[in-house]
Amino acid sequence: MTFKENGKSTTKKIAFSVCVLVLSMLLAVSSISCQTPAPTPVIPSATPDMPKPSEAWSADGIISTGEYSGTMSYGDYGIFWWSDQQNIYIAMEAKTSGWVALGIQPGARMENADMVFGFVKDGEATVHDSFSTGPYGPHSVDTEIGGTNDILDFGGSENNGVTRIEFKRALNTGDDYDNQFSKGTNKIIWAYGSDDESTQKHTARGYGEINL
């Protein structure tokens, strides 16, 4: 290819214009590529055949698959729970024909613990919403000390030497004699006895946690 010395050759102008055009196109494509947003990630939805624990929950004294999302075992005592951010659903079970109990957010030993006692007698479950005013009790029912009974639903069973109690209550009842369940770690104490009378000394007791 021959160019004139004065730089006014048509051929030279065409070549220069083509170079400018190609460079402009490359810059435009690069700009569009940089401004294109990243694709939105696809989040898989929950399996429709898997019911939420609250949908499967029933206060019948039977701990069924899908009823609870959390569980802890302390020897012969077990606890199960699930929360819908408004209420908490709890099951307690122990190898006993007597009472089972849970203390929520205790202080020193039992002091200021929000207590729930349950037992089954003649096939009928009884659950008490109680509060311990001292490290060793007493743990009177809330209604006797100016509080309210805030157990919304409950049930129980006793089979083959195992007692199971299920109950439902609000995370925060607003009762001065109920301790609030909070997101994160909630300290608990647990116990069970060999008799249906909650005033009888426990057979076993211990500390644990409910994580929400």
Image (spheres, rainbow, N blue to C red):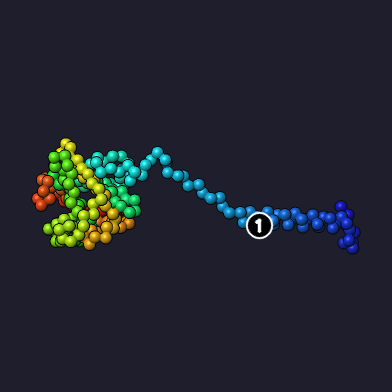
Q: Residue furthest left?
A: 200
Identify residue type, mark 1.
Ser
Residue 79 seen by the camera: no
Q: Secondary structure at mark 1?
A: helix
x 88%, y 57%: residue:
10
Instruction: Tell me if mark 1 has few (under 14), some (14-19) or many (20+) residues whose alpha carbon lies within 10 angstroms of its own.
Output: few
Give left or right: position of 111 versus 27: left
Question: Toward the viewer: 111 or 21?
Answer: 111
The answer to whether 58 is drawn above or below residue 183 in the figure is: above
> Residue at label 1?
31
User: Quarter of the image holding residue 56?
Assistant: top left
Give left or right: position of 34 versus 54: right
Q: Position of residue 185 (x, y in %)?
A: 29, 56
The answer to whether 110 is drawn above or below residue 52 in the figure is: below
Give left or right: position of 70 versus 127: right
x 53%, y 50%: residue:
40
x 89%, y 58%: residue:
9
Question: Toward the viewer: 167 or 10?
Answer: 167
Give left or right: position of 68 versus 149: right
Q: Position of residue 198 (x, y in %)?
A: 12, 50
x 13%, y 40%: residue:
122
